[in-house]
Image: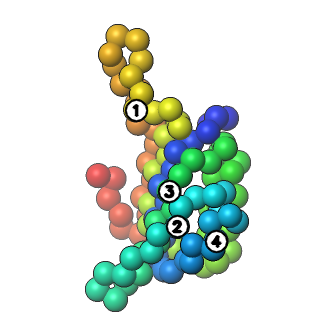
Amino acid sequence: MDDAVRCTIRVRGTLEPRWSERLGGLRVATEVIGGRATTELTGVLLDQAALQGVLTHLYDLGLPLLSVDCAPAGAGRTRAGGRRRPAGSAWRGEGGSTR
C-alpha cells in the first residue's frame, strides 16, 4: 500500500473529534449503545505508514481495536470492461466479524 487508502477503523471507547488532526485527518464519530462507547474513524490516509501511525496512536491511548477496513482510495471505481476493483483488505479483532 504505497498509495492513498480509504479506511474505516473502529475502537472500543470514546475519542473526541479534536483528535482528528493527530489521527491523519480522519473523521471521528463516537456512539454509545447499551452503555458501551464505540468510536469510528473514517477517511483517506496518505499511505500504509500513515495507517501505522494512526494505529500506534490508538494503541498508545489504550483503545482496543474492533475492526480495520482499508482499500485503495480509488476502490469501487469502475475499470475498463465495467468490472469493479477488488475491495482491499479487512481485519477484525475482539470478536468482530468479517461481514
Quarter of the image for residue 1 reads top right
| Residue hosting label 1 | 76
Circles 1 and 3 in contact, beta carbons < 8 Å: no
75 or 86, nearer to the observer: 75
Q: Secondary structure at mark 4?
A: helix
| Residue hosting label 2 | 28
Q: Amino acid at mark 4?
A: Trp
First in sequence: mark 4 or mark 1? Answer: 4
For the rendered model, the colour scheme is rainbow
Question: Mark 4 to mark 2: distance in Å?
Answer: 8 Å
- Check residue 19 in the rendering and tell me which mark sits there, or answer none: 4
First in sequence: mark 3 or mark 4? Answer: 4
| Residue hosting label 3 | 42
Question: Mark 3 to mark 2: distance in Å?
Answer: 7 Å
Identity of the residue drawn at 69% across and 51% down: 50
> For the view shown, which residue lies furthest in the top direction?
81
Mark yes or no: residue 41 visible.
Answer: yes
Q: Residue 40 location, x and y as percent? A: 46, 66
Vertical relation: 30 (above or below) 82 = below
Circles 4 and 2 in contact, beta carbons < 8 Å: yes
Q: Amino acid at mark 1?
A: Gly
